[in-house]
Amino acid sequence: MTFNPNNCRNESEVETKLIVSYLLPKLGYTPDNWHQEIAFGNIRLDFLSFATQVLPIVIDAESPMSVIIEAKHPRENLDRHIRKLKRYLTSLSIRYGLITNAKEVRIYERVADDIQLVFKCAGQDIETKIDEIYALVGRDSLKFVKNQDNLELEDHKINLVSPELISEVPVQPDNSATAEPNQNQISEPEIIPETVPVNTESKSEIKLDIVFPTTTQNTMKIIAVYHNKGGVGKTTTVVNLAAALSKQGKRVLVIDLDSQANTTFATGLVKFEDEEQDDLKHSNIRHVLLQEDGYSIAEVARKSNFCHPEIDVIPSHIDLMQYETELNQLDYSRMILIHKLAEVQDKYDIVLLDTPPSLNLYARIALITADYLIIPSDLKPFANQGLINVKDFIKKVNAFKKQIGKKPLEVLGVLSCKISTNAKFVQYSLSKRREAIPKRYGFEIMDSVIYERDDLAKCAEQFQIVGNMEIADPISVLDFKPDCIASQEFEMLAIEVLEKIGKN
């Protein structure tokens, strides 16, 4: 079988046409010693192959796992994914990682706590270079090697952030399967059998026995994005940060707490032209907040294909503004979201709360519920003056959080947003405005900067024709143009956020 990189037009085709149909067979891997779309805690791998198949699988320094293979969209820059590949190899003590977008193939080897590039070729040269690739990561060439760097791991086991069972999604006929990690809780450090379908056309099954050394509570992080000044890029930040976090392998839930429902629109959940077709009015954030019983997060959350991997969204609705007085009269209104999110703490890694640009009840609920806060600001005078109100609001919220035994809100910083790309402004004014934030208002300024760019506007304006209707069909900038500067800015923001909250 030959391979033509021009036949790969998206990530799914890189997986099926290059990896499954060509590369794995050429390297000697059969369906019983490679697995697709599997998860170890919060680490999700496209492909994992074995030099030797040994059961049970023990996640430690002597595990038989040997090669990770990661597939990327042909337009993706592989350099942007090396940091994540390094984390996979070092966290799971896997020796080799192959990453490809069909246009390029790279192989990295783990060396102590780092990785180094050991092979690189263009996709069009893969057939002439297949022997070199085989010599490195071919199944017969690659026998398991003990951890040569003598990494000292507690109890010779790796503590994963979330001790989930390994899960695997069988390859579907349309090759569009995605991984759904098993959410069962493991109460004892014992061998847990999990029956997993082999990814072949046969219906035979194998048992993967996974050993997890400890049980740790899932550390779902809740982040509010708030400023009481409107028009500072809050919605743009929420939806594209959600997409960037999803591409970092995080399970993301977005909750829209603004009655204007901009985030609900921006994530493509409004698929109707008028109120008669409105399928959101009977199940949205209002129902979650008003009903102590029923309308759980799991019931109301909707899948959004605004980005890939998909995120979940709790939509808002214009009717929300009518119920603030009623909610204010309910004793549990300020804490209801805390309790309902606790029910899904093992389903999500990160929850992003979009907030109204006000000091109202819904903003208060968001900040009471959140662990962390990002304050987007265009750094213009009114937005800066509004930081005084934000600071006072945080103080009042933290007083309430103290009463209910919840940790105070941790401010990740002011995020420079909707910033002009004018060269003179960037050169002479931007740094001064950024420096003023900690000096005048006592807030840390985040390293990331989100500039005003055409691609951000264009991706939000995408639509589809359904019958005789034009329906909004927005897409994240990271899916619209993966290699554009705006995508890179949100990717860097996601990395900064993950580092600050300890989820990297």
Image (spheres, grey):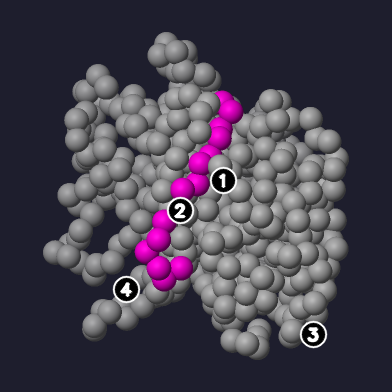
Task: Give SS at disc 4.
Answer: strand
Tag 3 and tag 1, C-beta contact below 8 Å: no
| Disc 4 packing (10 Å; few <14; some 14–19; many ≥20) | some
As drawn, 78 above or below 41 = below
Give, as a single range, the part of the protein colored magenta: 200-214
Count of numbered labels shown in the rendering: 4
The residue to which callout 4 is attached is 471
The residue to which callout 1 is attached is 55
Q: CA distance from mark 3 to mark 4?
A: 47 Å
Which of the two labelled residues, at mark 3 and mark 4, occupies the earlier sequence position?
Answer: 3
Q: Amino acid at mark 2?
A: Ile
Which of the two labelled residues, at mark 2 and mark 1, occupies the earlier sequence position?
Answer: 1
- Residue 289, quarter of picture: top left
The residue to which callout 3 is attached is 128
The nearer-to-camera label among 2 and 3 is 2
The residue to which callout 2 is attached is 206
As drawn, 79 above or below 133 = above
Q: Which dot marks residue 12?
A: none
Q: Amino acid at mark 1?
A: Leu
Tag 2 and tag 1, C-beta contact below 8 Å: yes
Which of the two labelled residues, at mark 3 and mark 1, occupies the earlier sequence position?
Answer: 1
Q: Position of residue 217 (x, y in %)?
A: 49, 27
Q: Residue at x 45, y 30 (%)?
A: 186
As drawn, 28 above or below 312 = below
Task: Classify the position of the N terminus by image quarter.
Answer: bottom right
Which of the two labelled residues, at mark 1 and mark 4, occupies the earlier sequence position?
Answer: 1
